[in-house]
Image: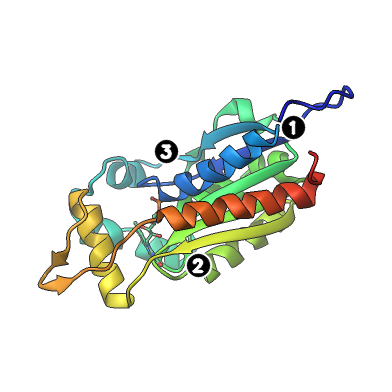
Amino acid sequence: MSAPSDGRRPPRVLLLAYSYTGQTRALLDAAGDVFAERGWEVESAPIVPEDPRIARRFGTFPMRRVWPDMLSVLPAQARRATCAVTVPESVVGGDYDLVCLGSPTWWSAASMPMRSFLKSDDARKLLAGNNFAVFIACRGRWRGNLAEITKLGRWQGGRYAGEYHATYPGNEVTSMLSLTSYLGSGEYREKYLGVTLPPTNVSAAQLDEARGFAESLADSLVGRDG
Ligand SMILES: Cc1cc2nc3c(=O)[nH]c(=O)nc-3n(C[C@H](O)[C@H](O)[C@H](O)COP(=O)(O)O)c2cc1C
C-alpha cells in the first residue's frame, strides 16, 4: 500500500527492543513487515546497555559461562535495579503513532535494559501521549515482565495498546536446560546433561502470530485503510 494521497503523512511506528539473542527482535521485525505492507513508516532501534558489567556478559554470544552469566543479574533483577542504557538520538525526537517495545523476561521481570530505558527521560519523550504495544519472548514467565513494562509505560504517559508474548515448550527444567544449552553453545542440541530437550526460542508459528497481532494493532489504531 502506498502513502495516503490526501496530504496526510503515513502513520509511523518505532520498533524499540532490547534483545540479547535476537528472539524479541524477530517478533518486532515480523510485526514491522506488516506495518510496512500497510503503508506505515517503520523505524527500528536497539536499547543498548552501556553498563560495563552488563555489556561484558551480554555483549557476546554464546555466553562465555552460561550459569554465572545468567545468575550475575539475578540480585539486580530482584531489586528491580537499573543500568546505563542508550537509544539512538535520532529516534528520541521522533514523532510516532505507535511505539512497539520488545523485551525478554529476565528472572520473572522485564530485562534490566528495558526497565532502565522506561525509567529514563528519553522514554517520557517517546511515550507521553503516545500508544505503546509490548512484545515479549521468554521460556514461560511473561506476566511479571508485561506488568512491569505496562506500568512504567503508563507512568511515562503512554497509552497501552496491547501485547504479544511468545513462550517456549517444555517444563521449568527442560525449557531451562534447552535454553542454557543454546545460550552456552549457540547451537540447538537434542540432549543436554542426559535430558531430551524441547525446542527453544521463537518459532515460525509465533512469528505468524506476531504478524496477526500487528494486523489487529494497525486496524485498531488507524483503521483497515490506514
Ligand atoms: C539472564 C536471563 C534470565 C532469564 N530469566 C527468565 C525467566 O525468569 N523466565 C523465563 O521464562 N525466561 C527467562 N529467560 C529466557 C529469556 O527470556 C529468553 O532467553 C529469550 O529468548 C531472550 O530473548 P532475546 O533473545 O530477545 O533476548 C532468561 C534469560 C536470561 C538471559
Which residue does the numbered mark 2 point to in the structure image?
142
Q: CA distance from mark 3 to mark 1?
A: 25 Å
Q: CA distance from mark 1 to mark 2?
A: 29 Å
- Of marks 2 and 3, which one's residue comes earlier in the chain? 3
What residue is shown with label 1? 95
Left or right relative to 16: residue 106: left
First of labels 3, 1 by sequence position = 3
The answer to which quarter of the image holds residue 35 is: top right
Q: Judge: label 2 CB < 8 Å from ligand 1.
A: yes
Which mark lies nearer to you, 3 or 1?
1
Relative image position of residue 28 (x, y in whole percent): 53, 45
The N terminus sits in image quarter: top right
Say whether marks 1 and 2 touch (CB < 8 Å). Answer: no
Q: Nearer the viewer, residue 142 or 218?
A: 218
Q: Is residue 9 visible?
A: yes
**CB of mark 2 within 8 Å of CB of mark 3?**
no
From the top left corner, tell me how far across and down residue 19 is, in percent: 43, 46
Decide if residue 119 is in sight here.
no
Looking at the picture, which amino acid does disc 2 mark?
A: Trp
Q: Nearer the viewer, residue 190 or 146?
A: 190
Q: What is the quadrant of residue 74 in the picture?
A: bottom left
Q: Residue 219: x and y, percent? A: 76, 49
Q: Secondary structure at mark 3?
A: loop
